[in-house]
Image (spheres, rainbow, N blue to C red):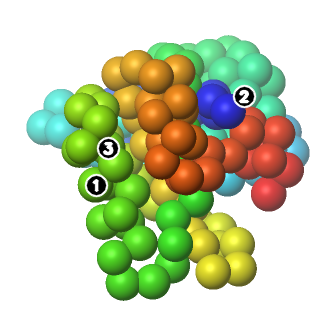
């Protein structure tokens, strides 16, 4: 139920971002979701791709600093209060949410949002108990 995410550290912002996307494209890798967080000194590009290991290897060979961690991709009802209901479960169960970002895919009456929890295994159990659907890596990489 956990999905691998890459975190790429970008020193020169847009220029290096363009290089990352070009390198992935040249190697037939599809980006499924991404988020760019900018700080005063650098940016962090978080992304889910269809081939995590190949992407990490290629980017490291090109001189990028790349980390890998696990996130959850959660199906959220696409209606007013849909996200609020999922976040209520997070709050009620005391789950520690580090960050989240939107996914660019819609499935029927639901959207997908990426969540990074400090304890993802515990979060999966709690959320599924509350009726929240957590997608598998295979489901996400195939989108």
Q: Residues within 10 Å of mark 2 (few under 14, many from 20)?
A: some
Look at the numbered disc 2 and give the secondary structure of its residue: helix
Q: Which residue is mark 1?
A: 88
Dots 3, 1 in contact, CB < 8 A: yes
Q: Nearer the viewer, residue 41 or 15?
A: 41
**The C terminus lies in which quarter of the figure?**
bottom right
Look at the numbered disc 3 and give the secondary structure of its residue: helix
Location of residue 74 in the rendering, given as x and y in whole percent from the top left corner = 55, 51
Is 58 left or right of 36, judged from the image as shown?
A: right
Dots 1, 2 in contact, CB < 8 A: no
Image-quadrant location for residue 27: top right
Q: Which mark is residue 52?
A: 2
Residue 14 visible:
no
Location of residue 65 in the rendering, given as x and y in whole percent from the top left corner = 48, 17
Residue at 67%, 53% in the rendered image: 32
Look at the numbered disc 1 and give the secondary structure of its residue: helix
Location of residue 111 in the rendering, given as x and y in whole percent from the top left corner = 56, 69
Q: Which residue is mark 3?
A: 90
Q: Nearer the viewer, residue 49 or 106?
A: 106
Q: Earlier in the sequence, mark 1 or mark 2?
A: 2
Residue 93 visible:
yes
Q: Which is closer to the viewer, label 2 or label 3? A: 3
| Furthest residue in direction front, as rendered | 129
């Amino acid at each position: 139920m956990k999905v691998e995410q890459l975190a790429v550290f970008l020193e020169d912002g847009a220029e290096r971002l363009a290089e990352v996307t070009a390198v992935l494209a040249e190697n037939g890798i599809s980006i499924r979701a991404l988020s760019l967080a900018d700080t005063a000194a650098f940016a962090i590009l978080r992304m889910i791709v269809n081939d995590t290991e190949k992407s990490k290897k290629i980017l490291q060979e090109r001189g990028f600093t790349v980390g890998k961690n696990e996130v959850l991709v959660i199906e959220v009802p696409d209606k007013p209060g849909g996200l609020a209901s999922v976040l209520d479960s997070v709050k009620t169960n005391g789950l520690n949410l580090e960050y989240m970002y939107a996914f660019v895919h819609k499935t029927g009456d639901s959207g997908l949002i990426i969540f990074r929890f400090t304890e993802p295994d515990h979060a999966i159990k709690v959320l599924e108990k509350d009726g929240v659907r957590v997608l598998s890596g295979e489901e996400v990489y195939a989108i």
